[in-house]
Amino acid sequence: MAPRIVHLVRHGQVYNPDAVLYGRLPGFGLSDLGKQMAERLGEYFADAPLVHLVSSPLQRAQETMAPIAAGHPELTVNIDERVIEAANVFEGKSFGKYNQLLLQPSSWWALRNPLQPSWGEPYPSILARMRLALADAAEKAVDGEALIVAHELPIWMARRWAQGRSPVHDPRKREARLASVTTFTFDGDQLLGAEYAEPAGDLVPPKKRRFRPGA
């Protein structure tokens, strides 16, 4: 059996002028720069032998998928709740320029256990749903490749699993930048490895290395 390929693609930049942690909230689509990133992804995958497309239900993911799907009009985009963004108790809030939100006593209980993490969906839960989504996509990747548009933390959980590493990590050190592509290779049920690429790397603004739960 030939190896099967599944690409995990992170969405492009989101229009978020109020700098809130948007999480799973509706109504957060791509910025103009994010749309450029999506177009770059469309070009990157234009000649790829894609046979199966999957998107998170969130607007930013579906808008990122649009140029990719346009290049493969014979394919239907399947919406999969399992690849949605991680839940987070700070959703809809702004941390402030200097993380003032985290200094408020009302936030302290949510920060009690960064190893779980206590402010959102537990890492094992995120990984479990992502592994199922990857396995299903790999089954569909017969005579071609599958592609999933998802979100930073779920993608990073899958990447750490592929590397045999603990899901516990420093959020400031994730390697899953905007419009990045993490490619998984499977031989049957066995994961052979993962590779990382940034087709729109030159478009991605520098990220401030500041701890923000879920960001």
Image (spheres, rainbow, N blue to C red):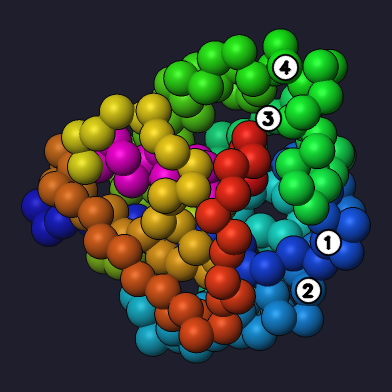
Q: Which residues are magenta?
A: 152-162
Judge from the rendering whether residue 163 lies leftward or rightward of residue 111; answer left or right: left
Residue at 71 percent of width and 81 percent of height: 33
Secondary element type, mark 3: loop
Residue where numbered disc 1 is placed: 16
Secondary element type, mark 1: loop
Query: What separation in Å lies between label 1 and label 3 (alpha carbons)?
Result: 18 Å
Residue where numbered disc 2 is placed: 31
Q: What percent of the width, then of the height, locates residue 62?
A: 69, 61
Labels 1 and 4: the sequence-earlier one: 1
Residue at 36 percent of width and 59 percent of height: 182
**Crowdedness of circle 3 by 10 Å Cα count: few (<14), some, many (20+)?**
some
Labels 4 and 2: the sequence-earlier one: 2
- Relative to 108, residue 73 above or below: below
> Quick check: marks 4 and 2 in contact, CB under 8 Å?
no
> Quick check: marks 2 and 1 in contact, CB under 8 Å?
yes
> Quick check: marks 1 and 3 in contact, CB under 8 Å?
no
Query: Residue 21's image quarter?
Result: top right
**Crowdedness of circle 1 by 10 Å Cα count: few (<14), some, many (20+)?**
few
- Relative to 81, residue 30 above or below: below
Residue where numbered disc 3 is placed: 87
Residue at 50 percent of width and 85 percent of height: 202
